[in-house]
Image: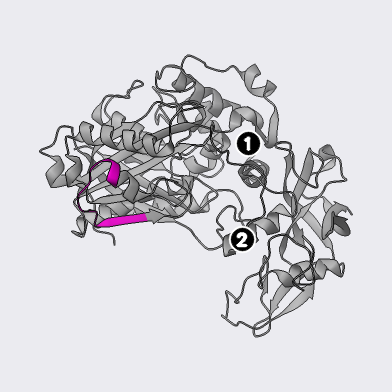
C-alpha cells in the first residue's frame, strides 16, 4: 500500500488571469504562475528542485527553470496526456519529495489553447505512432474529436441510467451559477438559464455547446513540499492525503469502446480505490469535490465512480441540489472548466486549495477534505487534499 | 496519399500493426485478428494476444451483421470526407466483438441503440472504407 499519506503538502499556488487571448507567450504564462505560486508559498525560486507537468504542455521545464533563476533541478517528470493527467503531477511531487529525491516541486500547466491552437480539430497527417494509428482508425469512421468520442460513451450511459439532456442541463446551470459569483471566472456574472442550455447548438450529440468546457488561455502552478517544511511557511499547509493514476484494462489514450461497460466510470473508479486507500478515507469524509468537466455530463458518472452515489443515481443527486454550494457535496465551486476556465484541471486543484484554506469566493463551511479528479474516458488521476 | 510505398492501401496514418485492416478494406472485407494459439478475437489491431501473449495471428473477416451498442452524431467542426451532421456507431457484431463504424447515409434521427445494422463498402477519396446502414 502507498505510504505517502500526509507526508507532503501544497504550500502555494499561482494563476494568471483566464482569457481567450492572453497576449503573451505560453512560457510567460507558466513563469508568471510559477512566480506567483512561489510568492504565495514564501519559497525562494532558488529552492525549487523539481518540476512536473503533462506531456501535452508545451513549456520546457528547463526554460521555466532558467526564467525563474533556478539553481539545481533534480526531478523533472511528465505524466501522459492532458486533462487526464490533472492530478498526476501531484502524485509525482508527493513521491519525489517523500522519497527524498526533491524538496520543492512546481506542478504547472500553461497554455494559449484558444488564441494559438485549438483542441478538437480534425486529425491531420501524423507520424504512425502507436497512439496516432489508433486515433486514425477511429478518425477513418468520422470519429475525430474528444466531444464525439466521449459523447458516444455518454449516449450509452444515458441508455443504461435513464439520464437525459434535462439532467445534463442541471449540471451546466449549476456550474455557471458557481462561475457567476467567481470574479476570476471567464463567465463571471454570466449565469445561464435552462432555455439558454437547450438553445445552444449541438456539437456532438448528446453534447451541446453548453456541455463543453471552454477553450482558454491561462496558466496555473502549484508548489509542493514536505508537510514538515510547509508548517513553517506562509500559508496553511494543504496536505496531499492521497493521489493516484487510473488506467484499467481496455482504456485507450482516449476512449474505451471495446470492453463490456463503456460508460466513462472505470478509469475514475480505479483512481478512487487507490486515493481512498492511501488517504484512509471514504466518500463520506469529503466535503467538496472538484470533478473534471471537459464535458459537463461526465460529472454524472464521475459522481458514481468516486462513490458519492450509486451507479445511475447521479442524475437525481444533482437534481436534488446536492452539488450546489449549500448542498451535501458542493461540486466545482469555482464554476468548473465550463464556467471558470479550461486549464486542463490544474485550476481545479487551485480551487481545492482555496476551499481548504477558507479563501474561496464560494466558500463552503467546515471543509477538511477535498477530492479532485481529472479527465474521465481517458487514463486519469485523482487526489484527496486536506487540512488538519 | 497514394500507395507509393507498397503497403497495399492508401490510409493516411497506419503502421505494420494496422496495415492488414486497410488492405482488407481494399478487398471489401472488414478484418479482425484471431489469435493463432488460443483463438481469442481482438479489435482494434494489436501486436500480441492479451490472453495468451502469442504474437501469431490470422485475420478473420466479419460477416457484417451487428446491433448498435451506442452512437454519436458529429455536428461540429466540419470534417474532411464527411457531410455533417453525420452519425458514428459502435456496433456489437455477431462474432461477439465491437466495431466502430461511420453511418453517414442514414438520417441521424433514425439511429437507435439496439437497432440491427450491417456494413457496406465505399471509397472516401482514394481510401477504401466501410460504413453501417440499417439491416
Whole-percent x and y of residue A258?
A: 64, 60
Whole-percent x and y of residue A52?
A: 34, 50
Residue A122 image-quadrant placement:
top right
Q: Residue furthest bottom?
A: B37
In the image, which residues are magenta? A66-77
Whole-percent x and y of residue A219?
A: 39, 35
Q: Does dot 1 land on a helix, a strand or a loop?
A: loop
Q: Is residue A30 left or right of residue B53?
A: left
Q: Which mark is residue A127?
A: 2
Q: Is residue B47 left or right of residue A103?
A: right
In front of the other: A369 or A107: A107
Whether residue A271 is visible to the viewer of this picture, yes or no, is: yes
Residue A67 counted in the magenta span: yes
- Estimate the spatial distance between the alpha carbons at disc 1 and disc 2, rounded to whole Å: 39 Å
Q: Does dot 2 land on a helix, a strand or a loop?
A: loop
Crowd band around label 2 with a 10 angstrom C-alpha radius: few (<14), some (14–19), many (20+): few
Residue A27 image-quadrant placement:
top left
Q: Are marks 1 and 2 on the same chain?
A: yes
Residue tagged 1:
A163
Q: Residue furthest top?
A: A189
In front of the other: A111 or A90: A111
Chain under callout 1 = A
Task: Work out which quarter of the rendered image holds the C terminus of chain A and state it.
Answer: top left
Amino acid at each position: 500500500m502507498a505510504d505517502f499519506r500526509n507526508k507532503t503538502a501544497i504550500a502555494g499556488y499561482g494563476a494568471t488571469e483566464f482569457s481567450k487571448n492572453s497576449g503573451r507567450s505560453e512560457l510567460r504564462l507558466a513563469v508568471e504562475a510559477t512566480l506567483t505560486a512561489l510568492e504565495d508559498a514564501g519559497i525562494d525560486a532558488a529552492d525549487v528542485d523539481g518540476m512536473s507537468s503533462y506531456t501535452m504542455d508545451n513549456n520546457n521545464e528547463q526554460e521555466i527553470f532558467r526564467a525563474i533563476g533556478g539553481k539545481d533541478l533534480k526531478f523533472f517528470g511528465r505524466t501522459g496526456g492532458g486533462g487526464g493527467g490533472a492530478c498526476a503531477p501531484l502524485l509525482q511531487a508527493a513521491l519525489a519529495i517523500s522519497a527524498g529525491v526533491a524538496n520543492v516541486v512546481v506542478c504547472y500547466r500553461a497554455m494559449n489553447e484558444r488564441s494559438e491552437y485549438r483542441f478538437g480539430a480534425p486529425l491531420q497527417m501524423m507520424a504512425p505512432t502507436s497512439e496516432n494509428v489508433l486515433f486514425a482508425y477511429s478518425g477513418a469512421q468520422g470519429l475525430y474529436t474528444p466531444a464525439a468520442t466521449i459523447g458516444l460513451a455518454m449516449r450509452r450511459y444515458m441508455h443504461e441510467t435513464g439520464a437525459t439532456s434535462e439532467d445534463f442541463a442541471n449540471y451546466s446551470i449549476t456550474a455557471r451559477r458557481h462561475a457567476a459569483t467567481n470574479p476570476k471566472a471567464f463567465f463571471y456574472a454570466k449565469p445561464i438559464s435552462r432555455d439558454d442550455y437547450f438553445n445552444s447548438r449541438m456539437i456532438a450529440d448528446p453534447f451541446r455547446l453548453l456541455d463543453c468546457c471552454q477553450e482558454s488561455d491561462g496558466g496555473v502552478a502549484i508548489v509542493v513540499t514536505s508537510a514538515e517544511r510547509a508548517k513553517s511557511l506562509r500559508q496553511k499547509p494543504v496536505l496531499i492525503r492521497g493521489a493516484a493514476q487510473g488506467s484499467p484494462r481496455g482504456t485507450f489514450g482516449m476512449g474505451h469502446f471495446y470492453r463490456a461497460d463503456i460508460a466513462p466510470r472505470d478509469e475514475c473508479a480505479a483512481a478512487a480505490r487507490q486515493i481512498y486507500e492511501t488517504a484512509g478515507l471514504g466518500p463520506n469524509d469529503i466535503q467538496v469535490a472538484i470533478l473534471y468537466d471537459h464535458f459537463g455530463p461526465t460529472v454524472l458518472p464521475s459522481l458514481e465512480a468516486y462513490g458519492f452515489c450509486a451507479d445511475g443515481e447521479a442524475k437525481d443527486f444533482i437534481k436534488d441540489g446536492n452539488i450546489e454550494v449549500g448542498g451535501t457535496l458542493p461540486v466545482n465551486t469555482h464554476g468548473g472548466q465550463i464556467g471558470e476556465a479550461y486549464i486542463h484541471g490544474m485550476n481545479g486543484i487551485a480551487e481545492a486549495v482555496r476551499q481548504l484554506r477558507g479563501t474561496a469566493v464560494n466558500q463552503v463551511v467546515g471543509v477538511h477534505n477535498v477530492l479532485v479528479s481529472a479527465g474521465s474516458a481517458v487514463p486519469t488521476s485523482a487526489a484527496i487534499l486536506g487540512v488538519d | 496519399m497514394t500507395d507509393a510505398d507498397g503497403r497495399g492501401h492508401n490510409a493516411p496514418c497506419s503502421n505494420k500493426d494496422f496495415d492488414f485492416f486497410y488492405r482488407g478494406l481494399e478487398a471489401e472485407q472488414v478484418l479482425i485478428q484471431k489469435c493463432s494459439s488460443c483463438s481469442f478475437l481482438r479489435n482494434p489491431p494489436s501486436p500480441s494476444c492479451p490472453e495468451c501473449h502469442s504474437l501469431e495471428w490470422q485475420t478473420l473477416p466479419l460477416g457484417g451483421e451487428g446491433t448498435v451498442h451506442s452512437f454519436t452524431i458529429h455536428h461540429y467542426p466540419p470534417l474532411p470526407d464527411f457531410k455533417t451532421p453525420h452519425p458514428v456507431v459502435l456496433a456489437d457484431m455477431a462474432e461477439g466483438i465491437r466495431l466502430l463504424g461511420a453511418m453517414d447515409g442514414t438520417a441521424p434521427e433514425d439511429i437507435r441503440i439496439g437497432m440491427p445494422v450491417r456494413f457496406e463498402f465505399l471509397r472516401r477519396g482514394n481510401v477504401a472504407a466501410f460504413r453501417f446502414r440499417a439491416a
